[in-house]
Amino acid sequence: MAVEPKKHAMPVQDPKERARNFSEVALGYSPSVAVAEASRCLNCKNRPCVQGCPVNISIPEFISKVKESDFEGAYRIISQSSSLPAVCGRVCPQETQCESKCTLGIKFEPVAIGRLERFVADYHNANFKGEPELPEQNGKKVAVVGSGPSGLTCAGDLAKKGYKVTVFEALHLAGGVLVYGIPEFRLPKNIVEKEVEALKKYGVEVQTNVVIGKTLTVDELFEQGYQAVFIGSGAGLPRFMGIAGESLKGVYSANEFLTRANLMKAYSPQSRTPIMHAKRVAVVGGGNVAMDAARTALRLGAEAVRIIYRRSMDELPARKEEVEHAEEEGVIFDLLRNPVEILGYSNPEDRRDPLNGFVTGIKVIKCELGAPDEKGRRRPVEVAGSEYIVDTDCVIIAIGTAPNPLIKNTTAGLEVGKHGGIVVEESTGKTSKEGVYAGGDAVTGAATVILAMGAGKTAAKAIDEYLSDKVCKKGK
Amino acid sequence: MYKIISKRRLNPTVTMMDIEAPLVAKKAQAGQFIILRVDDDGERMPLTVAGCDRAAGTVKIIFQIVGGTTIRLNAKNEGECISDFVGPLGCPTKTDGIKKVCIVGGGVGCAIALPVAQRFKELGATVHSIIGFRNKDLLILEEEFAACSDSLTVMTDDGSYGRQGVVTAPLKEQIERGENFDEIITIGPLIMMKFVVATAKPYGVPVTVSMNPIMIDGTGMCGGCRLTVDGKTKFACVDGPDFNGYEVDFDEAMSRSSMYAQFEQREREESCKLFSREAK
């Protein structure tokens, strides 16, 4: 039987329409399309896709179940490795992970693993009515700091092994970057809520409004009887460029802009949190966060939204599908441009002019690609004298974050690197402090959801070994 | 949910509440702040801690009824709850090595200045307090300040109570007559703090200012509370809220604080309408 050369397309909302609403862009496979797509899998012997997955989901096995229309069976296989399948199916960069390794991908398009994962998780969430089988409790307590992807994964894995896990969240809502960062149209918040609810069914307790490093310290968690602590406190302070005009009104960090729109739902008339509804928006940066900010700005009613990125399309670090969706929705890509200065309005005649101090434009300089840097990416070189001004009412800076300082400042014996990330042993997530493990952006600086999940998983395994070992030693 | 244990009106526009939040009460120190949300659609509002009762597990907040959120908060009564209350955030006010201090508070900023004054008194420092209000009706916490200050000067803009004039006048007099303050700590409107710094400058007295910029998470994530301090970008939520007054760019901070002026105006009007309807 000849193999279908292309992935089955996933229906999406019309670009013109969706650029003006916050509903999810991609609509997901139907059961029949999922079965047809699953049938493209060659079920090859060496299973390269599994190696491409940071949490090593048994991909061919779950796809086989889909092929047999046993969607619950497929879910059970995925959930052995992943605590957040509905999230990963939507936000993982599959094209550089599992799908990049797919044998079918050598000649044709790879199997749409991400779309299948999403289908299976959504099917389960919509149809499964039973209660999960609860593991026997082992009486040991673990504290997890932060309820983002690394924390939820670590909590889920440990709870499934019988640990009593408490997750401490600084904000008023659980989910971390999944609720404050990634927009509704890419990852609906009710999906995150369902994944958190699923963990609670396993006995995970979530305490919101507790800032570890302030409300409680890591040492106090041990005093309270927690035997191990996982730190997944995520990204911290946004980076700025250090150019003139960054403090003008209308300049946001992507974190602030997205937090207002997502966590605080500033797009909704019911929300009490304000956000700027600018007509012209410039987003600086080329990652997923930049795409999210640009597409959110469109949905808030902007007429012209541009991405300003200093390299070319080939180097753009965002997930491919997000770039395509952004282009379809009309986001303009000003590539090979670097911001030099942000310009603001100032009325020398009237100090009380309400427009004073608001952004009016951004001055950029053209770049060319030079020799590759140490990471092998071609370095942008500014073209002298090529500056020009782009008119804009709002500038959103999405050039990354530095790790959060709150925990390192209040935890003696916790070693951090020169960029502020917590230093860990990569194979275990173990930090320099006894019983303390860490993972996700708190360690690596800004990275992806799935890498954070991988780190949470690694740490859960190491914590389990550490605490099992400790009991054995005590027993002797 | 966090219960309102007591509520007291300090003046027609300023309310004091004790909120049940044992974890925060256990840790909070003078100069730190909390973030609250009144209800589920509410914004996250930072408020500096005005005191706490560690035994009772309550935290004192004092707020001016200025906009949508504070109107909603003020509508809550004793025994009712608010959705969220998190803290203590930010760094406590530094007290090391300060033997003689001048506390300069303006308006509702006095609510935050009070625990700082009390803390210095506890530590055995000499405390001079200067508190200023627009008029007599807006005066708050006079007795409390008197109890923890070696000298207290009350100023009103219109002379309806205490001395007439701005807080910088008695500050200048005290410095000139040789009160050798180790530190001046000022909390109040940005424009007042700017002038306190300008007043102290010729005499080289160190000034600490307490900044209260627009903020969302309050934990060093969003970057909305950034200020330019000594030419560098600083974040009030994790680096502050106290800063060296000589290094803060006040003009920029004042400009940034008006970012949502229009929205706030609309919110205020809507909230007023809402509550007047409910009252009928």
Image: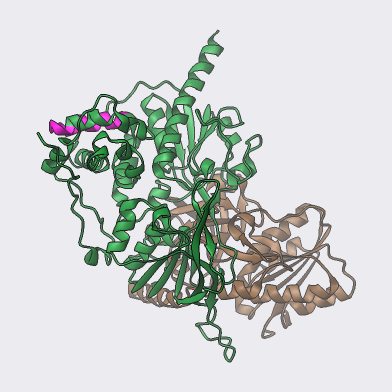
Chain colours: A green, B brown
Foreground: A289 or A331? A331
**Residue A408 screen position, x and y as percent:** 61, 42
Residue A467 shown left or right of residue A38 in the figure:
right
**Secondary structure of the magenta portion, mostly?**
helix
One can see residue A252 in this view:
yes
Q: Residue at x 21, y 56 (%)?
A: A12
**Residue B64 screen position, x and y as percent:** 54, 70
- Residue A69 magenta-highlighted: yes
**Residue B259 screen position, x and y as percent:** 50, 73
The span shown in magenta is A66-80
- Residue A86 magenta-highlighted: no
Foreground: B139 or A291? A291
Quarter residue A281 falls in: bottom left
Residue B10 shown left or right of residue A101 in the figure:
right
As drawn, the residue found furthest toward the right would be: B178
As drawn, the residue found furthest toward the bottom would be: A349
Foreground: A146 or B126? A146
**Residue B125 screen position, x and y as percent:** 81, 57
Quarter residue B232 falls in: bottom right
**Rendered-image quadrant of the C terminus of chain A:** top right
Residue B185 shown left or right of residue A419 in the figure:
right
**Rendered-image quadrant of the N terminus of chain A:** top left
